[in-house]
Image: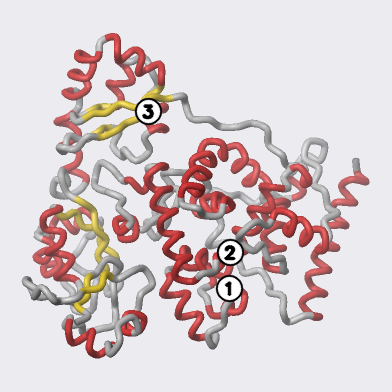
Amino acid sequence: MRIFVLASLLSFFSVLAWAQQEETESDTLLLPEPTGEILPADSVPVSLYMLPVELDYIPGNETPELLADRLSCIQQTIPLTYNRTVHGFIDYFTVRNREYTRSMQRKQDMFFPLFEQKLKEYNLPDELKYLSIIESALNPKAVSKARAVGLWQFMSGTGRYMGLHLDWYIDERMDPEKSTDAACRYLAQLYSIFNDWELALAAYNSGPGTVKKAIRRSGYKKTFWEIYPHLPRETRSYVPQFIAMIYAMNYAEQHNMLELTREELPTYDTLQVKQFVHFEKLAELTNTCLEDLQKLNPSMQRNVVPENGKVHIMKIPSLAKQNLELNRVAILDSVSRFGKKEAQLLATKYSGGSTEGRELISYRVKSGDVLGGIAMRHRVRVSDIKSWNNLRSDNIHTGQRLAIWVIPSQRSVATASTKTVAQPALLSPDTKTYTVQPGDTLWDISRKVPGLTVEKIKKLNNLKSNSLQPGQKLIIS
């Protein structure tokens, strides 16, 4: 057994020596970026000395040539480039944090069939299913420090642009089906912009505008690795992590970390409801577990289905559905009354003013903004904004993000007042408009119409800056 340990350590140090040698011999390969800020939040690096060698022997005979060959064998549509950067992340996922890769194997069956179905539906590369591992560790309720949410880590603005609804009760960014459909549509849009999957992935991480800027700074280079030095640090590591995870998941057995145990969702049926439903009461009356209802309905944030005039489709365990049908009217009547007033009081208490029937938007504070002005534009109270954002004073700073709950009918008014565009209320029938797409710049739009210039667009739309928002409508003639 000591021989195995010695062999493993010798091989490990030989890889380090190879990496150092490559650094001095070649300028074309890239060093791994520091990974602390972008690796999954729940990952815990595992030391070689912490692993029981008898149960978890770590093979150490993977030469650079072997790793490159293995990647070429599993490459499909998206390039799986091999270099020192990728090698560093392969080492992380197969040696230093093997348990994280194992945990992803345990979770994959809960979500990969859905991902594969949606990717096929949109004619997208199947290997994109691994992207959610990098984004959220296959956790539909994941929330990042930047408030990106769900399996595919949508910010509120991008999520709403892609058709995902969010309010105090429901956040569809946490809905596996709806968020996966939105992610597929968004990835397809990004690919149509760059016609390159590595650049599309980089844009998914940092935004298409950031990638376009890196392309310009590189002298209009064509590939991810050519514009690599001009990208943000997190994005430089994003694509290599994606490649390394594809490798780790496909060659788990070769690294002696194949995980046979699988986590599963409870078998379920669906229930269409329009009235208020209290999860805990429903679980009690249908003889099921509250945890199962929560696991099946991650987008329902308050353990209730709100009564807001919409029909909601919730998932319930198959056994619960059978028990429900035995006394459907009485059970649904009970769960629609139980806890309703309490839920409404909690909504009022913990979100400032009541958020019932309101939608969440994310507002970025601009130079000169004050809370009073922001509240007036969004038709809310200053005290509500302070409560929603846990502010102890009226002080705010430029660039700060504020969560604001607006009435849907007022949303368009608030949005228009926060943008730099002021379009006339009535347009003549022959007026032509253009809807801003993700990654669009004024320069891009001006090239789409003969004779149109950036200055003309700004004049037609009363724009005071070059800032644009996806979905924004611009007059172009």
Picture layout, residue 186 above or below residue 260: below
Tell me which residue sits at (79%, 73%) in the image.
20
**Nearer the N terminus, badge 1 or badge 2?**
1
Give the secondary structure at mark 3: helix
Q: Which residue in the protein does label 3 denote?
A: 293
Q: Which residue in the protein does label 1 denote?
A: 224
Give the secondary structure at mark 1: helix
Give amino acid for label 1. Answer: Phe
Mark 3 → mark 1, Cα distance in angstroms = 42 Å
Q: Residue furthest right?
A: 3
Residues under numbered marks 2 and 3 in contact, where contact means CB atoms less than 8 Å apart: no
Mark 1: few, some, or many residues within 10 Å (few <14, many ≥20)? Answer: many
**Nearer the N terminus, badge 2 or badge 3?**
2
Quarter of the rendering occupied by the C terminus: bottom left
- State the mark number for residue 239: 2
Give the secondary structure at mark 2: helix
Give amino acid for label 2. Answer: Val
Tell me which residue sits at (56%, 36%) in the image.
109
The image's colouring method is secondary structure
Mark 2 → mark 3, Cα distance in angstroms = 35 Å
Quarter of the rendering occupied by the N terminus: top right
Mark 1 → mark 2, Cα distance in angstroms = 9 Å
Left or right: where 47 falls relative to 354: right
**Nearer the N terminus, badge 3 or badge 1?**
1
Tell me which residue sits at (54%, 41%) in the image.
112
Question: Percent x, y for residue 389?
Answer: 25, 57
Picture layout, residue 188 above or below residue 423: above
Q: Which label lies toward us, 1 or 2?
A: 1
Give amino acid for label 3. Answer: Leu
